[in-house]
Image (cartoon, rainbow, N blue to C red):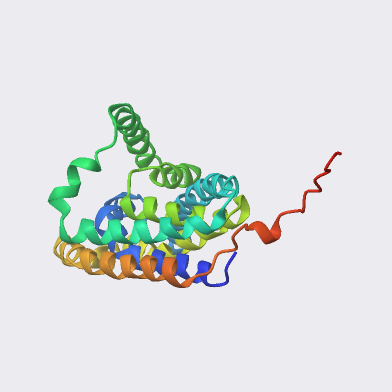
Amino acid sequence: MNNALPYLALSMGLLSSFHCIAMCGPIALALPVQKGNRFQQFAGLALYNTGRTFTYAALGIALGSLGYSFAWIGYLRYLSIFAGVLMLLYVFWPTRLDPYFHPPKFWQKFIQHLKKQMSAMLRSRKMQSWFLLGVLNGLLPCGLVYLALISSIATGNAFNGGFYMLMFGMGTLPAMMAVGFFKQWFSISLRMHIRKLTPFMLTLAGIILIMRGILIQYTANNSSNLNTITVCHGK
């Protein structure tokens, strides 16, 4: 894996934190961790966010395996450029793109079932339930996660794809830990102000993805790497 990719994944995670606070922050705020001591609070939030990161890494492994199946890895750079352009288009023309981002009905039904399971886990005070809540939360629709997953394909194999998404998840941890641990600081008004920063973060992340596709060199299979095939000419 290119040395720059883990840093890109971590940067994408950090940039996505602003989006996470606005969209997923309410789940972290709803965790019943405030009644315990400081260690219990930290442990509960850490388990929840570890569950999210675990799901991201598992999805990265799956899509990294898909990337390995491509014979010509060099074409994967265009996925990064496409993801960046798509992100920029969504920032500047969201109303035009919104109709194309609705998941199919069967997936909507799955998400509704998922949310019911998450609601039940929110009422639980068992720490293992908070980990599972994070695992399920990682499956909820999120455009930034989807774009990171598209980028993980370019790593070319399962291990690197999983590591890429692990770094992405770790990038989101500081903000998500803060919003849960210091919930009294994150009022509705503050979360709305943070949400207004999301378009700027999306724009910056889109530019990073495009520049990555342009500048990062992928190892491509070409004719010089192929084994020479001996051709026998009969008389």
Judge whether residue 35 can be spotted in this image: no
**Percent coordinates x, y for residue 123 in the rendering:** 35, 39
Q: Residue at x 30, y 28 (%)?
A: 109
Q: Residue at x 25, y 64 (%)?
A: 184
Along the viewing direction, whichever of 63 and 43 lies nearer the viewer: 63
Q: Is residue 81 left or right of residue 66?
A: left
Figure check: 144 above or below 63 = below
**Percent coordinates x, y for residue 212 in the rendering:** 43, 69
Q: Residue at x 34, y 64 (%)?
A: 17
**Percent coordinates x, y for residue 198 in the rendering:** 23, 64
Q: Residue at x 28, y 36 (%)?
A: 103
Query: On the rendered image, what quadrant is the N terminus found in?
Result: bottom right
Q: How many marks?
A: 0
- Asked where in the image residue 83 lies, by quadrant, the reply is bottom left
Outermost residue to the right: 235
Outermost residue to the front: 235
Q: Is residue 147 left or right of residue 127?
A: left
**Percent coordinates x, y for residue 173 in the rendering:** 42, 63
Figure check: 199 above or below 123 = below
Along the viewing direction, whichever of 94 and 60 lies nearer the viewer: 94
Judge whether residue 87 can be spotted in this image: yes
Along the viewing direction, whichever of 137 and 108 lies nearer the viewer: 108
Query: On the rendered image, what quadrant is the C terminus found in?
Result: top right
